[in-house]
Amino acid sequence: MAATKTCTKCKKIKFLSEFWKNKTGKDGLFTHCKSCMSAVNIKATKKYRNKKPWKARLVLYNKRHKSDLKEKDIINLFNKQDKTCALCGLELDSSWGTKDIHLDHIIPRCVGGKTEIENIQILCPMCNIGKHKWTTLEYIAHCERVSIFNKKEN
């Protein structure tokens, strides 16, 4: 028979495989089951992101890019850009929801750009997605070609 444990949150008896591993617990498992832990973590994460939106986003960014950008540097950059997209000038929401603002490498990492504040710009999602792996100058040149081509068509 498989080993079971009672979740301290929902009070249900569950298989041990339904608990997250925890090095500090007596039996090596958390006291809440995975579904209860997920609910607790989601609530705590949302509260943290609402309280410190810049820092929450930067933690993920730094982990992904193995960098150590600071919250104050990003806020200063955001203010220096007048809270607008560096490429199109669209006004950006200062609460910095995960969908509203993108940090972008001016010189992409794939061509040797570093994750340093001097090589970072804040863009709207459309500009960042469109720019993709181009340098800022390459992307601007491409947009100009698109604009010229469309003027000829009309």
Image (cartoon, rainbow, N blue to C red):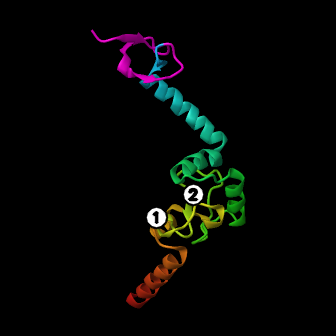
Residue at position x 54%, y 74% in the image = 136
Residue 117 is situated, as x and y percent measured from the top left of the image, at: 65, 62
Please tell me how crowded label 2 is: few (under 14), some (14-19), or many (20+) other residues with Cα within 10 Å: many
Q: Residue furthest left?
A: 1
- Image point 63% across, 64% down: which residue? 91
Q: Residue at x 52, y 17 (%)?
A: 25
Q: Which mark is residue 60?
A: none
> Which residue is at 64% across, 50% downward?
95
Q: Is residue 62 above or below residue 76?
A: above
Up the image or down, 60 lies above or below 154; here it is: above
Q: Nearer the viewer, residue 111 or 134?
A: 111
Tell whether position 12 is magenta: yes
Q: Amino acid at mark 2?
A: Ile
Q: Which residues are magenta?
A: 1-26
Where disc 2 sits, the SS reads loop
Picture coordinates of residue 86, whole percent (x, y): 61, 69
- The three-letter amino acid code for the residue at tag 1 is Ile
Find residue 7 and report its image quarter. top left
Label 1: how many Cα within 10 Å (few below 14, some 14–19, many 20+): few
The answer to whether the residues at label 2 and label 1 have Cβ atoms under 8 Å apart is: no
Which of the labelled discs sits on residue 101, or is there none? 2
Residue at image mark 1: 129
Kindly give the residue lying farthest to the bottom in the view shown: 152
* Relative image position of residue 61 (x, y in whole percent): 55, 51
Q: Quadrant of the C terminus?
A: bottom left
Q: Is residue 37 magenta?
A: no
Query: Quadrant of the rendered structure where residue 93 is?
Result: bottom right
SS at mark 1 in the image = helix
Q: Nearer the viewer, residue 25 or 35?
A: 25
